[in-house]
Amino acid sequence: MDYQKLASLLKVVAESNRLQILEMLSCGEMCACDILKNFDFTQPTLSHHMKVLEKEELVRVTKKGKWHHYSLNQDTAALLINGLSKTLSNVSTP
């Protein structure tokens, strides 16, 4: 397991706005304008969050006209889920 990659991904998703963005994208591709409607921050702030998510390859971006459309990168999401699951697999439940 690549613990360095897993740690980087966990650091990115530890921010609540980015975690909410990922949840929204888990339902399908979304335009930046539609993502922004769900938050009380500016477009430059959204742009920053999306760049962080894109850098870690958690989201994919395509440009359609003047709008950016984002989708969840299923491969990286699976890496995150499986990595954390394997890391905590020996935890016993109360």
Image (cartoon, grey):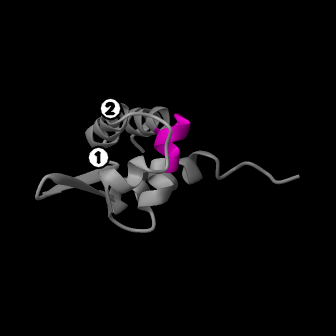
| Residue assigned mark 1 | 57
Amino acid type, residue under disc 1 in the picture: Glu
Residue at 25 percent of width and 54 percent of height: 60
Q: Label 2 vs label 1: CA separation? A: 14 Å
Q: Quadrant of residue 52?
A: top left
| Residue assigned mark 2 | 48
Residue 40 x/y as whole percent: 50, 38
Tag 1, which secondary structure? Answer: loop
* Secondary structure predominantly adopted by residues drawn in magenta: helix
Amino acid type, residue under disc 2 in the picture: His
Binning the other alpha carbons within 10 Å of mark 2 as few (below 14), some (14 to 19) or many (20 upward) gives few
Q: Is residue 64 left or right of residue 58?
A: left
Q: Is residue 22 above or below residue 13?
A: below
Determine if residue 83 is in view.
no
Residue 37 x/y as whole percent: 44, 50
Tag 2, which secondary structure? Answer: helix
Residue at 89 percent of width and 52 percent of height: 94
Residue 26 x/y as whole percent: 45, 63
11 part of magenta stretch = no
Q: Is residue 86 left or right of residue 80?
A: right
Task: Point out the image quarter for the N terminus.
Answer: top left
Residue 39 - label: none
Residue 79 vs residue 11, the one in the foreground: 11
Q: Please state the extent of the stretch shown in magenta in the rendering.
A: 13-20
Residue at 47 percent of width and 32 percent of height: 11
